[in-house]
Amino acid sequence: MADDFDVEVISRDEDGRSARFLVRGLTPAMANGIRRAVVADVPTLSIDTVRFVENSSVMFDEMVALRLGLVPLTTPLDDFELGDTVTLALDVEGPATAYSGDLETSDSLVRPADENIPIIELKQGQRLEFEADAVLDTGKDHAKHQGGVAVGYRHLQRVEVLGDRDGFDEEEPHILRGVIETDEGELVHTEEFGADLTNRYPGKELAVTDVPDAFVFHVETDGSMDVDELVLRAVDSLRDRADELATKVAV
Amino acid sequence: MMIPVRCFTCGTVIGEHWEEFKARAKEGDEDPAKVLDELGVDRHCCRRMMVSHTDLVDVVSPYQ
């Protein structure tokens, strides 16, 4: 197996919430291992227990608690260990809408990553007051703890121009998704030309092949941490488990 | 009832964009597709969450 991976960032959002990057020298098993680690092994904080003081809204306590669990919380992983908790509280009286941004936390580093998520709309005389515990756990335990959403990878595809197309053939759309490598070695996402190769190479005959051991990852986070941190933590967790296996087998 | 916090299929937070989408596309007269594009709701799984949602709090609240 190759010792060095070659990583190239193709695109990255300014807010650090999504990125697309190319890794060369990976086996398909490793690529899937990274994907699974991003989804299931990087822990995030999420509300787990809610103690209601008053809930006279139109939703049951359980329904409100489920919605609260899904609100992403920023997670400074250096300061927390698995199972640590942070207390949050909310007190809103109608007529008003309780938003995720109304949540008060006991730790200033932990706050809702998105502040405009409506929790519940309260009418005149209705009130929502509770205290909640957010716990640090992994996506294996509950999907609300997944830091990565919509994580996936595709083969890098090489598009070669073989020559001019036969002039009497009718040009049909050649739809291709993902990132292609051109003859000049340029990396282009097919969305840039409408996912149709005939837009980029009109009148050409093309050959499309998968580049061996090269994968283009697309990772998005729910806001609990940056994409960079999420992916690095995922890779660390893979390494830790490999080390653990090595030491246990060595005995 | 209320807009789901996350997309059922992919888990992206979509509740965040509901109020703007409602004001501009459901109650306003903008093209819903354009509003969703501007909000960054790209995937069709997330888009159906917004397009097919109806707020029911007003309907339910008299029957407390």
Image: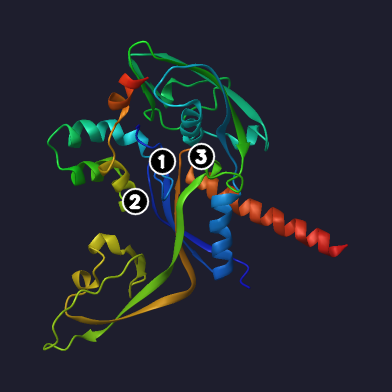
Please state if B36 lies on the left or on the right of B31 as rendered. right
Label 1, label 2: how many angstroms apart (C-alpha)? 11 Å
Q: Report the residue marked by disc 2.
A: B45
Mark closest to the chain's N terminus, 1 or 2: 1
Q: How many marks?
A: 3
Q: Would residue B3 be visible to someone looking at this image?
A: yes
Q: Position of residue A35 (x, y in %)?
A: 53, 57
Q: Report the residue marked by disc 1.
A: B6
Please state if A202 lies on the left or on the right of A52 as rendered. left
Q: Report the residue marked by disc 3.
A: A225
Please state if A92 lies on the left or on the right of A143 as rendered. left
Picture layout, residue A98 above or below residue A224: above
Q: Name the secondary structure under disc 1.
A: loop
Tell me the kind of residue under disc 3: Met
Q: Are marks 1 and 3 in contact (CB under 8 Å)?
A: no
**Between B62 and A222, which is closer to the camera in this rendering?**
B62
Q: Estimate how packed mark 1 is, as few (under 14), some (14 to 19) or many (20 or more) residues with alpha carbons within 10 Å.
A: many
* Residue at x 26%, y 71% (from the top left corner): A175
Q: Name the secondary structure under disc 3.
A: loop
Tell me the kind of residue under disc 1: Arg
Q: Chain of mark 3?
A: A
Label 3, label 2: how many angstroms apart (C-alpha)? 23 Å
Picture layout, residue A29 above or below residue A142: below
* Residue at x 36%, y 13% (from the top left corner): A94
**Between B13 and A76, which is closer to the camera in this rendering?**
B13
Please state if A149 lies on the left or on the right of B27 as rendered. right
